[in-house]
């Protein structure tokens, strides 16, 4: 035999009679390889799925018999002969000393292969090599023994083996659910690249071939001889692949299936971990610079990817292999951790905290996450839910802030600091992502500007996607639109009675514009409203437009922001102001009255008239006295003696005023004018126009001139509260003079038509600047109140408001009336008695006021200035009220409901 004995390592056992041998490595080049068939024997053939050839019986068992003995091990071999096609056949020797009998003898003796017909015929040839003849004789003896002993393939009782499935026809998701996180016996059949393996899972029902992508790592690609695709070998790809092959190829391992890959992967592809007694191959690859972290699959790693990232950082620092020449991205913000308190939730991923050490507010975006898109109508509702989730979890709570990186300004986005923020042990970003209320940003491998808790974010996102919650549910969620109870005074009055009866109403403070002015939201009713603290006056805070506030205005605003902003509060409603704002008390933590807290700190003063109407008036006065004695806030220079002196002077002035007023009450006022009622504001309040011909002509001429003298609308025109404008009334599309009462969202404005008294909400496109020639004329509508009368304060009788409206409307609507102006109070509506001129001489009993009293829908107002001027008419009006009470008319139908009011 000419060929000499050679050394090699078994790279691969192809079948029970065929091997791939690997020679010694020379330098950095891959070692030479050769395929060697075992001489003179034939094992059952494994099938080929591409050629649609099935496995022969006992083929896998034969291959496995040989693989378990020599795969990955050193052997000696000799080439005995070659075929015309160049394929080599020889003998292989394995064992402790790599000497002994030909391995083929062991295979045949165990019934794993048989002697070929060509070998049998060779014995009869005269030119047969003596060594070959001797080996063939021994092989025939071994086969005879196997047949006699009924071993292996010669056993008549050979059980039907489990099928070997080289294609994957199952549902990958169901397959993963069945075997996820179980340690499955497997054999590594192929190494495509260092992080992509073909493994055969030894399952109870079959040997299933799958593609395994190592969880958490990505090695350089090696793609050669793939039909329809160009070859691609990335740097260090071959070296990485070789090192995995010598460690894992055709080795028995355990595999843990952990997830499915992203994108359009081939059927039967899974992410998972290889478990081997020699160690973790993923950690070895990363630590030696053969692989980098794959964020998409790092989420599947048991215990997280923190250890792998530490190994990767070490490999980068050493510039090993794929990190050769690596220049890491310099973080824009050094990592820093500090304690803070959450003061405001800006949106679903941005939070304002108060840095305790710097005593300053700082805004942070939660690192590496993105809130649901507000511009997407299907996701806008999830953004609101994300913000509300953060508000409930951490508003006003102490948190730990770790600054991860700085995001520079880009296009229309301003620069931001991004941080990982934790409340107790809860990462706010993870909390949002896990509940499907945010998504995780994806980065390049060399981008180190990311959350310090990035791996946990990825795991949370995978959990949310699996659970199909939030933005992953496939269910659209539009933004909720709350109704505005403060749109105008009329709308506000329709809510106040219900809320007054409800006692303390749970609310959320959405915005704070001043120490005593808040925007509230009532979740139960999906209503928002403007709210003013009753009984106090807070200094005006500075505005965003640069206008200066009053002393201590900023401090009062800051206090309310710190203690009430975005908090759950309870509210007591006491009344409504002229523009639709609600008045009352706000309770923090169900115990602290916000108005009292401001007073105690000297950040507000008692508003006498409002405090006297409040059920908490005594407590408000007491809180102010405490601040005065402690000389806090606005009372820093307080002097009790000076206050007593001013009080004495005020008392003397009030006494003199009463003397002067009594002197003026010599005769009732007689000032009759013709009027038309243009608007009913409430059962006791209305607007009147003077009905003199000259006034009517003046109004008609002005309206005609106004219709053709509109000033052009300019892009920079923004109506201001209190400004006189020209407004187009929606009924008839006619232009009228109006006054802006309130600016509303979405370029809407509440305006009052000063020549008629009615009000409505208009879009800015229906508002124009008012020419100066129209601005000087006095309003043609004048606010008035019915003299001598008022509505009761009792809540029960408020149910009769609509009936009072209906009666008053029937008496005044569309009629030309005569009004006697009984009183003209300073800074208040005039008080009038209305008469129908067709009823003859004006007497109180036949007036509109008298009809309201006689119908039982009002009580006498003894304190009204009109009652002081005309005591006789006031007495008559009281008689009409008493008569209605005794006859059980109107609100008196069930008796006296007003008590000692």
Image (cartoon, grey):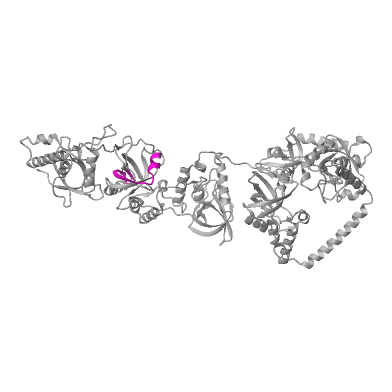
The reply, left or right, for residue 205 in relation to residue 297 is: left
The range drawn in magenta is 174-197
- List x then y, in percent, for residue 808: 83, 38
Side of 523 where 174 appears, left or right:
left
- In the foreground, 335 or 97: 97
In the rendered image, the residue lying farthest to the front is 157
Task: Locate the N terminus and report the quarter of the image it occupies.
Answer: top left
Can residue 777 be seen at all in this image of the molecule? Answer: no
x and y, in percent, of residue 260 in the image = 40, 42
**Closer-to-camera residue (31/613):** 613
Question: Looking at the image, is 736 positioned above or below residue 459?
Answer: above
Q: Is residue 440 magenta?
A: no
Res 189 quadrant in image:
top left
Mark count: 0
* Residue occupying the far left of the picture: 126
Position in image of residue 178 (x %, y %): 39, 42
Compared to residue 869, the image places residue 16 above or below, namely: above
466 vs 625, left or right, is: left
Where residue 555 appears, as percent x and y from the top left, is: 66, 59
Front in this rendered view, residue 89 or 121: 121
Q: Is residue 645 visible?
A: yes
Q: Residue at x 71, y 66 (%)?
A: 630
- Find out whether residue 190 is within the magenta segment: yes
């Amino acid at each position: 035999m000419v060929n000499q004995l050679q050394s090699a390592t078994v790279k691969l056992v192809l079948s029970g009679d065929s091997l791939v041998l690997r020679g010694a490595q020379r330098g950095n080049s891959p070692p030479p390889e050769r395929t060697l068939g075992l001489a003179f024997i034939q094992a059952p053939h494994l099938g080929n799925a591409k050629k649609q050839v099935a496995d022969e019986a006992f083929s896998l068992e034969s291959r496995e018999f040989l693989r378990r003995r020599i795969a990955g091990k050193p052997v000696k071999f000799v080439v005995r002969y070659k075929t015309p096609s160049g394929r080599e056949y020889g003998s292989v020797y394995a064992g402790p000393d790599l000497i002994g009998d030909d391995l083929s003898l062991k295979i045949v003796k165990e019934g794993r292969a048989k002697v070929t017909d060509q070998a049998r015929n060779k014995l009869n040839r005269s030119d047969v090599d003596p060594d070959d003849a001797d080996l063939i004789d021994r092989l025939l003896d071994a086969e005879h023994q196997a047949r006699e002993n009924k071993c292996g393939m010669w056993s008549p009782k050979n059980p039907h083996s489990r099928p070997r499935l080289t294609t994957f026809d199952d549902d990958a998701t169901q397959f993963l659910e069945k075997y996820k996180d179980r340690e499955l016996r497997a054999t590594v059949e192929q190494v495509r690249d260092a992080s992509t393996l073909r493994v055969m899972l030894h399952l109870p029902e079959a040997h299933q071939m799958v593609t395994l992508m190592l969880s958490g790592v990505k090695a350089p690609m090696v793609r050669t001889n793939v039909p329809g695709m160009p070859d691609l070998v990335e740097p260090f790809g071959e070296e990485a692949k070789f090192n995995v092959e010598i460690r894992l190829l055709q080795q028995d391992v355990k595999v843990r299936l952990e997830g499915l890959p992203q994108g359009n992967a081939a059927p039967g592809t899974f992410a998972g971990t290889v478990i081997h007694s020699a160690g973790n191959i993923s950690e070895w690859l990363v630590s030696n610079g053969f692989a980098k972290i794959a964020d998409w699959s790092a989420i599947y790693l048991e215990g997280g990817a923190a250890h792998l990232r530490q190994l990767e950082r070490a490999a980068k620092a050493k510039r090993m292999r794929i990190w050769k020449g690596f220049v890491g991205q310099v973080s824009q913000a050094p990592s820093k951790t500090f304690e803070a308190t959450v003061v405001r939730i800006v949106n679903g991923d941005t939070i304002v905290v108060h840095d305790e050490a710097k005593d300053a507010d700082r805004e942070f975006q939660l690192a590496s996450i993105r809130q649901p898109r507000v511009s997407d109508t299907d996701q806008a509702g999830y953004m609101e839910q994300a913000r509300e989730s953060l508000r409930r979890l951490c508003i006003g709570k102490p948190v730990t802030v770790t600054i991860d990186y700085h995001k520079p300004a880009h296009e229309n986005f301003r620069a931001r600091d991004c941080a990982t923020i934790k409340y107790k042990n809860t990462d706010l970003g993870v909390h949002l992502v896990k509940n499907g209320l945010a998504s995780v940003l994806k980065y390049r491998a060399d981008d180190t500007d990311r959350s310090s808790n990035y791996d946990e974010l990825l795991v949370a996102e995978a959990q949310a996607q699996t659970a199909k919650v939030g933005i992953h549910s496939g269910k659209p969620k539009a933004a909720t639109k709350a109704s505005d109870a403060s749109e105008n005074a009329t709308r506000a009055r329709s809510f106040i009675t219900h809320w007054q009866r409800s006692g303390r109403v749970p609310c959320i403070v959405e915005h704070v514009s001043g120490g005593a002015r808040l925007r509230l939201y009532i979740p139960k009713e999906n209503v928002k409203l403007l709210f003013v603290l009753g009984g106090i006056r807070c200094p005006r805070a500075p505005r965003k437009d640069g206008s200066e506030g009053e002393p201590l205005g900023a401090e009062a605003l800051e206090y309310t922001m710190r203690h009430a902003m975005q908090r759950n509060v309870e509210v007591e409603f006491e009344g409504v102001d002229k523009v639709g704002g609600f008045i009352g008390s706000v309770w923090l933590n169900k115990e602290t009255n916000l108005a009292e807290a401001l007073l105690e700190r000297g950040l507000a003063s008692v508003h006498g008239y409002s405090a006297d109407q409040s059920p908490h008036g005594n407590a408000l006065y007491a809180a102010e006295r405490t601040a005065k004695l402690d000389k806090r806030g606005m009372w820093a220079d307080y002097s009790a003696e000076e206050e007593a002196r001013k009080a004495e002077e005020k008392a003397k002035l009030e006494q003199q005023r009463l003397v002067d007023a009594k002197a003026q009450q010599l005769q009732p006022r007689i000032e009759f004018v013709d009027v038309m009622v243009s608007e009913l504001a409430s059962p006791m309040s209305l607007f009147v126009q003077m009905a003199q011909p000259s006034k009517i002509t003046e109004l008609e001429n002005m309206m005609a001139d106004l219709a053709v003298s509109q000033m052009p609308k300019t892009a920079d025109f923004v109506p201001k509260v209190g400004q006189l404008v020209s407004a187009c009334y929606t009924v008839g599309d006619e232009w009228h003079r109006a006054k802006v009462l309130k600016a509303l969202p979405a370029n809407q404005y509440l305006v009052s038509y000063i020549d008629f008294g009615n009000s409505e909400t208009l879009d800015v496109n229906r508002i124009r600047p008012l020419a100066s020639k129209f601005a000087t004329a006095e309003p043609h509508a004048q606010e008035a109140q019915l003299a001598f009368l008022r509505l009761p304060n009792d809540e029960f009788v408020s149910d009769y408001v609509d009936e009072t409206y209906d009666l008053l409307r029937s008496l005044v609507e569309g009629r030309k009336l005569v009004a006697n102006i009984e009183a003209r109070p300073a800074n208040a509506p005039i008080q009038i008695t209305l008469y129908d001129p067709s009823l003859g001489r004006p007497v109180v009993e036949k007036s509109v006021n008298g009809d309201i009293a006689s119908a039982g829908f009002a009580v006498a107002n003894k304190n009204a200035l009109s009652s002081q001027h005309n005591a006789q008419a006031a007495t008559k009006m009281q008689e009409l009220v008493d008569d209605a009470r005794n006859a059980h008319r109107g609100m008196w139908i069930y008796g006296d409901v007003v008590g000692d009011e």
